Image (spheres, rainbow, N blue to C red):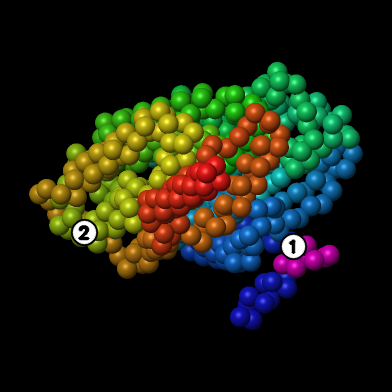
Amino acid sequence: MVATTTIATLLAAEGGSYSLLPGLIAVPVLTAVLIALLPASRADYTKLAALVGSTITGAMTIYLLWNFDAADGGFQFVTQRDWVPGLGLSWFLAVDGISLFLVVLTGILFPIAILTTDPHHDAKPYYLWLMMLMAGSLGAFMALDLLLFFLFFEVVLVPMYFLIGGWGHGDRVYAAMKFFLYTMAASALMLVGIVSLVLLASGDTGGPTFDVTVLAENQQLSRVASFLVFGSFALAFAVKVPMFPVHTWLPDAHTEAPTAGSVILAGVMLKLGTYGLLRFGLYLFPEVVRDLAPLFLTLGVVGIVYGAAVATMQKDLKRLVAYSSVAHMGFIVLGIFAFNSQGLQGSVIQMVNHGISTGALFILVGWIYDRRHTREIAALGGLQRSAPMMAGVFTLVMLSSIGLPGLNGFVGEFLILLGAFSSARWWAVVAVTGVILAALYLLWAYQRSFHGPAEGENATMEDLRLSELLGIMPLLVLIVFLGIYPKPVLERIEPAVNELIAHMESKDPDFQEDEPVPTVRAGTPGLVQAAEEAHEEGQAESDGESSEEEAGE
């Protein structure tokens, strides 16, 4: 209690505003500086420093969640200071229900990734890059100044490039270079779009400004200019997601990256793309995204089916999980461009769920590789006999990735399909096949890896150690908790989603949210609720008709 009070006192800034958000960036940066000053010979000190720094940052994100006003759909914990006033630049950080849980997810995944994995060499620069990656990821999720967002969006490329190239496997240099060139080229185009938007909108905003909230309310670009600027944003975000057909960097990067790199890449960095589409695409260009929705819905559905189909053919267990991310991110894109409350809520919570489930899968695959020195599915088999605890944990995480009811993956996929079915019915029908294919490739991979006779090294593979089980336990708890009781998350996401939809309606006269489907909440059977509401509406209509007949008589 004393520690919590002390933290709150330290985070209180002048004027009653909060400096908590800058602190979330400062702590990892200061930790990286501390690691740089530590002697290279003490690798245990560097890991301890990284673990303490990331854990403190994670505790601060929990504090943020605890003090977040669930009923407020606007931006909270706002920190805004002039940076370069003449150019309209400011240090503008804030969170709402859309970005809140991505910040918390980042705060949780980094200490778990550090705790459950170890570098095989050069621990000092390894943990330094991880801390810089954490700072950049948190900054990107909180920045509401376009140039500030771009800087954080770009900063994360450098640590991940060095993590893949320096501590990866196999063709790690090729994978790192491919990752960097793909994302850097698309981001450079986004910078052109940002500058163009600010200059073209300066007449509407009373001067140049990079403030997203001001631009969203006041910019009135021509149709052609809006399409071109949005196109520059969309390409950068599509590569980061990644969406089909600009996804080819992802399997290589995931396969060759160290385990912690894969966990953060899948759990955090991919969300920068879908978050960018939500925060900047829908918010700044509502008319354009409505016109281009069929294109993005099609690409999202193609990603779902293609990612699942290709994952089924993979021989490498880690590469299979990598292609599963393409399919899962396609679901998130589908929900975003459904343009209704259910779809958008489902997309946000599915970003979190994917980070939890896929992050846990990469940790487990990494442990298997450390023990067997192979990820080839054909070389595994019978692992359930020698490592029953490993098999049990893998089963739980695998079922959550499939979307089994009662686990976290089901909630997001169900809401996305519910929202998409009401506004993009045929796309939703095709997307359902992705759910079936996910069950196929994950169950088949599990069967070949864990069932059957155990031969050679498979028969003597070490089971999960207690320290490993405790390290991954927070993710297992979240998998079950969010599957059974998602209400605390959804009730914080919903007001921000409704604010976004209201903004889109106010800026685009032709935009109208589709007829809402009853929202499924924890403890309320959705079909029963829908039936009851339909019955009440029918009863009301019947009573109205009876009254009219009596009046006529």
- Three-letter amino acid code of the residue under disc 1: Tyr
| Percent position of residue 224, x then y | 70, 18
- Three-letter amino acid code of the residue under disc 2: Ala
Q: Pick whichever, 291 or 518, lies toward us.
A: 518
| Percent position of residue 123, x then y | 49, 54
Quarter occupied by the N terminus: bottom right
Single out the residue that lies furthest toward the bottom. Answer: 2
Q: Measuring 72% from the left and 51% from the top, which residue is drawn there? A: 93
Label 2 belongs to which residue? 387
Q: Measuring 42% from the left and 31% from the top, which residue is drawn there? A: 425
Residue 14 counted in the magenta span = yes
Secondary element under disc 1, as helix, strand or loop, is loop
Residue 520 counted in the magenta span = no
* Residue 249 left/right relative to 39: left
**From the viewer's perspective, is residue 103 above or below residue 219?**
below
Label 1 belongs to which residue? 18
Q: Which residues are magenta?
A: 11-18
Crowdedness of circle 2 by 10 Å Cα count: few (<14), some, many (20+)?
Answer: some
Q: Measuring 61% from the left and 61% from the top, which residue is drawn there? A: 70
Q: Pick whichever, 229 or 179, lies toward us.
A: 229
**From the viewer's perspective, is residue 536 above or below residue 476?**
above
Q: Measuring 11% from the left and 48% from the top, which residue is drawn there? A: 452
Q: Can residue 78 be seen in the rendering of this structure?
A: yes
Q: Pick whichever, 407 or 452, lies toward us.
A: 407
Q: Pick whichever, 301 or 48, lies toward us.
A: 301
**From the viewer's perspective, is residue 265 above or below residue 489?**
above
- 2 or 1: tag closer to the N-terminus: 1
Secondary element under disc 2, as helix, strand or loop, is loop
| Percent position of residue 482, x then y | 43, 58
**From the viewer's perspective, is residue 19 above or below residue 167?**
below
Q: Can residue 170 be seen in the rendering of this structure?
A: no
